[in-house]
Image: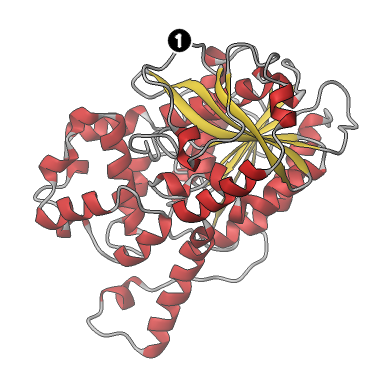
Amino acid sequence: MPFTSGYTLSVSPRAATARRRTPRRRTAVVAALAVLVLPALEVLPAGAAAASAATSDSATSDSATSHSAAASDAEVQTAPTVADDFYTPPDPLPDGDDGEVIRWREEPEQLSARNYLVLYHSTNGGGQDIAVSGRVLVPNSPWTGEGPRPIVSDASGTRGLGDSCALSRSLDYRGPTISAMLGKGWAVALSDYEGLGTPGGHAYAVGQSEGRSVIDVVRAATNLPATGLAAGGKVAFSGYSQGGGAALWAGELQPTYAPELDLVGISAGGVPADLRAVARGLDGQLGFGLLLFITYGYNTAYPELDLQSYLNERGLATFEAEQGACVGVTYAHAFQNMRLFTTSDPLDSPAWQARLDENRLGANPPDVPIRLYHGLIDELVAPGQARTLRNEYCAAGADVQWEWHLGEHALAMVTGRPGVVTFLDKRFRDVPFTANC
């Protein structure tokens, strides 16, 4: 198996549960948590987002206005008085096909690319029509390959639950990856997922919803004439962690949900393919706060699960307090466990397990080249369940390239980035693919 070099950052479970830690052990814990949450602390809070929007509002709106006729029935917003107004969909939501643009505006360039904020139709895990926000970036540099400019739907990793955490508000740690993609001449479409940016709870880690959002932002990109992107061009899905799961869900859903897309490849790292296994690996460990996020997300997607009925007083207070939180809040929950927050563990319930199983990857392997990679000592997303997904895909005849990276969760994201861009470039240029199942 190929390895990518890197240093190891891990914390001994025995040290984690000890009543007292030595200074060296405390330092190791702090360092590990910093790797987990510091990138996310750069996400713009609501106030900063408003300031950014105010700057955008003061810029000329001639470009967006000039495209209003071409945008058909989509509502064009060029100068909202309140930043969050853009993210609030019309009520009632107008009828529209998946990927149809509800509202859009052009904003100042980012990363040497034209920059469009979009609100578009999608379908959630319960089959309901919803509005999802996102961003489309179109580089100023030309595409030098054959056919229309390709589009990468780059699925975001964990950002949190609050609207201020949405990727469309700040690219932050995704910037280097997105910049590398734009530098190749590809357009990049970014979905905020259900409820992250728009009103309502975020359906965190609910693959049936996230996968459709990742697909429909591509449709939105081509449905908006201002972008100049043509339908029928090559498309790829890419993501890491939560985004890796979303990218693969998009791939599993695409043949029936969006057969018109010319999907040519999927790159997915740190994939939470089986949330039951991921949950077992998080309980009582460094990333326990992510397990709380999972329960919140499934409660949003499937209200009949009634998470509140399982929570004790501390759990109810935490649930209410964290609905608007970004991923940095997980720092406070390191090495906690479900017993602290519940009267009984919801993940032991058949109803919860059934919903988690509905969102388990592997049943419909995508029929395109797939690049999977994972940290060998990933402390947040259990490596074993990722290996199981690889084995299931390979057994079903899928074309898979698999890589172990010598590192934990955050480091594998960084070391995996060059391989992502190389893989996608070969897919868009029709370079022969070699699987290593």
For the question of whether residue 45 can be seen, the reply is no
Is 92 located above or below residue 333 in the figure?
Answer: above
Does 128 sit left or right of 132 as displayed?
Answer: left
The quadrant of the picture occupied by the C terminus is top right
Q: Which residue is mark 1?
A: 95
In which image quadrant can residue 272 be found?
top left
Does 417 sit left or right of 197 as displayed?
Answer: right
Nearer the observer, 228 or 250 = 228
Which residue is pictured at 90% across the width and 32% down the height? Answer: 144
For the question of whether residue 113 can be seen, the reply is yes
Tally of numbered tags: 1
Question: Looking at the image, which residue sits at the far bottom?
Answer: 23
Is 197 located above or below residue 42 in the figure?
Answer: above
Nearer the observer, 174 or 4 = 174
Task: State the image coordinates of residue 373 (x, y, percent, origin top left).
Answer: 60, 47
Nearer the observer, 234 or 174 = 174
Is 349 located above or below residue 375 in the figure?
Answer: above
> Which of the colour schemes (rainbow, by chain, secondary structure, one colour) is used?
secondary structure
Nearer the observer, 79 or 112 = 79
In which image quadrant can residue 127 be found?
top left
Does 329 sit left or right of 197 as displayed?
Answer: left
Q: Residues within 10 Å of mark 1 (few under 14, many from 20)?
A: few
Task: State the image coordinates of residue 24 (x, y, percent, origin top left).
Answer: 42, 87
Question: Looking at the image, which residue sits at the far right?
Answer: 144
Does 300 sit left or right of 97 as displayed?
Answer: left
In which image quadrant can residue 199 be found?
top left
Which residue is pictured at 51% across the width and 47% down the height? Answer: 157
Task: State the image coordinates of residue 3 (x, y, percent, origin top left).
Answer: 66, 58
Task: State the image coordinates of residue 46 (x, y, percent, origin top left).
Answer: 45, 51
Amino acid beneath label 1: Asp
Secondary structure found at label 1: loop
